[in-house]
Image (spheres, rainbow, N blue to C red):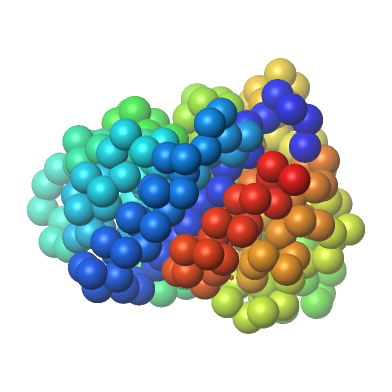
Amino acid sequence: MPAKRHALIAGNWKMNGLKNDARLLAGGIANRMAKVKKAPFEVVVCPPTPLIGLVVEIVKGKGVSVGGQDCHANVSGAHTGDTSAALLKSMGCKYTIVGHSERRTDHRETDENVREKAVAAHAAGLTAIICIGETFQEYADGKSEEVNKRQLKSSLPEDSNAKNTVIAYEPVWAIGTGKVATPEQAQEVHALIRNDLAKLIGNHESQKIRILYGGSMKPSNALDLLALPDVDGGLIGGASLEVSDFWKITQAISS
Ligand code: PGA
């Protein structure tokens, strides 16, 4: 990864943990981060929505950012159960994930929905972590490139730049399965994504924008994945629920 892109290690806690688990997890990460001077990586944790306020308080002043796992496309209104990007921002979030494959599947979110959510995130002053990635069937059918190209083009707002947007490539077949893309596969897709980004938002921004890998990243494979020239960090699910595993992944950046 070129030094000009600051690595991002993002923990996606998904629907895991109760209040006390969040206290321990956020506290453990914050305490480790607070001891690091000039970290060569940025850390963001994305807790379940009701825990965001608590986590923001715990990590305050410790160099850890907080993100939502999703946001609604509208600023406010009659949308029971949803959370606006503006509310995430007012609670102290810096990021929000949009278009995670679990949202695309569980809630039938389309590329168009994802783009609208990313637009809302940008309008609220959040950095959108836009997720894309092919399913196992698409991968087996040799359609990975086509699927990622389509999802990227249709999910990315026009005003996207390296400040307000991060892309997460998460092959669906690797999420929570223990199967992980080989470094060769990951680098190939990340380079294609960066190439497509150059066409969509210009070469300059495409060189600065961070592209994270997600899908069974853990301490044992992080070093190989994070060393790749076009992999600028990770979006981590399972391994982000253990302080020591998550922290070990961040250390793959510094080593
Ligand atoms: P995983 O999840 O690390 O558990 O595979 C990654 C993600 O879904 O963001």
Quarter residue 215 falls in:
bottom right
Which residue sits furthest right?
184
Residue at 19% over, 49% down = 53
Q: Is residue 158 left or right of residue 231?
A: left
Q: Position of residue 71 (x, y in %)?
A: 31, 50
Which residue sits furthest front?
35
Residue at 32% over, 64% down = 24
Of 172 and 29, nearer the camera is 29
Of 213 and 55, nearer the camera is 55
Q: Position of residue 252 (x, y in %)?
A: 70, 51
Q: Position of residue 149 (x, y in %)?
A: 71, 49
Residue at 26% over, 48% down = 58
Q: Position of residue 237 (x, y in %)?
A: 51, 66
Q: Is residue 213 left or right of residue 73?
A: right
Q: Quadrant of ligand 1?
A: bottom right
Classify 141 as above or below 166: below
Classify 72 as above or below 95: below
Quarter containing the N terminus: top right
Of 211 and 116, nearer the camera is 211
